[in-house]
């Protein structure tokens, strides 16, 4: 019993230490965002003078920072990407879980193999494809990039769909229900947890992406930037001494929407993950 308690205490101590280390940069970012100092202050962890003026400054755009426009652009892209990606993932997962067709195993194996390669390897091909169709420096191009391959991430959703009772689907087929009817009227209502998981995952991709956004939105028009590009521009060596604390404040505000979304849907998110693992 004593040995068991020591093991339990050791595990929790290690987790507490790791959590503390993980939280240090987040706490530093939040504290720095409330600093009265404009540039980077490395002399003290906590600011000597506190102020909210940098948060206020974010909502008063100037020639360098246009945070409201960046936030709006990113939110629009994220919402459309979430809708399209969620539909793609759910439909592909349903096809792989409920429908048996000749190329099913081959397609599943190929999707796993392709997912092993980093997406950035296709950046050049993606850019020139978008340029050919005139979709660079456009939100439509970004939405297509984020959504087009989303169906490849169907595996977790498929694991959840595998737990849906097949008896219900068979009964629906006997009553003359089509595959589309089974999908919308039976499977989707029973899959709220995994839908929430898919929505959050899909929303995170455009919300946090920098690489593809920087590559596609390269016209240099500040008003059209996403939040990631706009905040990155503040770290330019000619601007960092005046905008570093504003950058920190922007980083804090960007984290708020996804944190609220996760807290509201946390229960369904966990259920979706555990259901997928069981499947």
Image: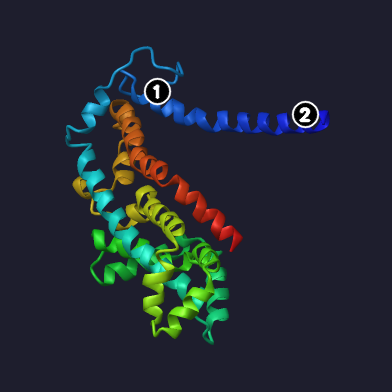
Residue visible at 26% across and 26% down in the picture = 54
What is the x, y in percent for residue 150? 42, 65
Residue visible at 60% across and 33% down in the picture = 18
Asked whether residue 237 appears in the rendered view, the answer is no
The local secondary structure at tag 2 comes to helix
What is the x, y in percent for residue 78? 31, 54
Q: Residue furthest top?
A: 48
Gap in angstroms between the C-alphas marked 1 and 2 = 36 Å
Q: Which mark is residue 126?
A: none
> Would residue 144 appear left or right of 73 to someone viewing this image?
right
> Circle 1 is placed at which residue position?
31
> Circle 2 is placed at which residue position?
6
The local secondary structure at tag 1 comes to helix
261 or 69: nearer the viewer? 261
Residue visible at 45% across and 51% down in the picture = 268
Asked whether residue 36 appears in the rendered view, the answer is yes
Q: Which callout, 1 or 2, points to the residue nearer the camera?
A: 2
Tell me if label 1 and label 2 are in contact, CB under 8 Å: no
Pointer 2 local density, CA inside 10 Å: few below 14, some 14–19, many at least 20: few
> Would residue 25 appear left or right of 75 to someone viewing this image?
right
228 or 201: nearer the viewer? 201
> Would residue 99 appear left or right of 6 to someone viewing this image?
left
What is the x, y in percent for residue 275? 55, 58
> Would residue 91 appear left or right of 276 to someone viewing this image?
left
């Amino acid at each position: 019993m004593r040995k068991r308690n020591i093991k339990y205490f050791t595990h929790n101590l290690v987790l507490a230490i790791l959590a503390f280390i993980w939280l240090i940069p987040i706490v530093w970012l939040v504290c720095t965002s409330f600093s009265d100092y404009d540039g980077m202050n490395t002399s003290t962890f906590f600011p000597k003078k506190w102020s909210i003026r940098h948060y206020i400054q974010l909502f008063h755009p100037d020639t360098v920072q246009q945070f409201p426009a960046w936030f709006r652009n990113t939110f629009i892209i994220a919402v459309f990407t979430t809708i399209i990606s969620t539909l793609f993932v759910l439909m592909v997962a349903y096809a792989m879980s409920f429908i048996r067709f000749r190329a099913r195993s081959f397609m599943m194996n190929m999707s796993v193999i392709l997912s092993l390669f980093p997406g950035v390897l296709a950046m050049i091909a993606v850019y020139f494809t978008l340029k050919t169709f005139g979709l660079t420096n456009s939100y439509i191009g970004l939405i297509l990039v984020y959504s087009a391959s989303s169906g490849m991430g169907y595996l977790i959703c498929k694991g959840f769909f595998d737990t849906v009772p097949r008896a219900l689907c068979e009964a629906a087929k006997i009553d003359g229900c089509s595959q589309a009817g089974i999908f919308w009227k039976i499977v989707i209502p029973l899959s709220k947890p995994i839908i929430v998981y898919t929505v959050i995952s899909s929303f995170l991709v455009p919300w946090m992406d920098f690489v593809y956004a920087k590559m596609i939105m390269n016209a240099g028009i500040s008003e059209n930037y996403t939040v990631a590009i706009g905040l990155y521009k503040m770290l330019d060596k000619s601007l960092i001494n005046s905008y570093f604390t504003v950058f920190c404040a922007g980083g804090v505000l960007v984290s708020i929407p996804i944190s609220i979304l996760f807290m509201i849907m946390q229960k369904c998110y966990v259920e979706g993950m555990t259901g997928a693992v069981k499947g």
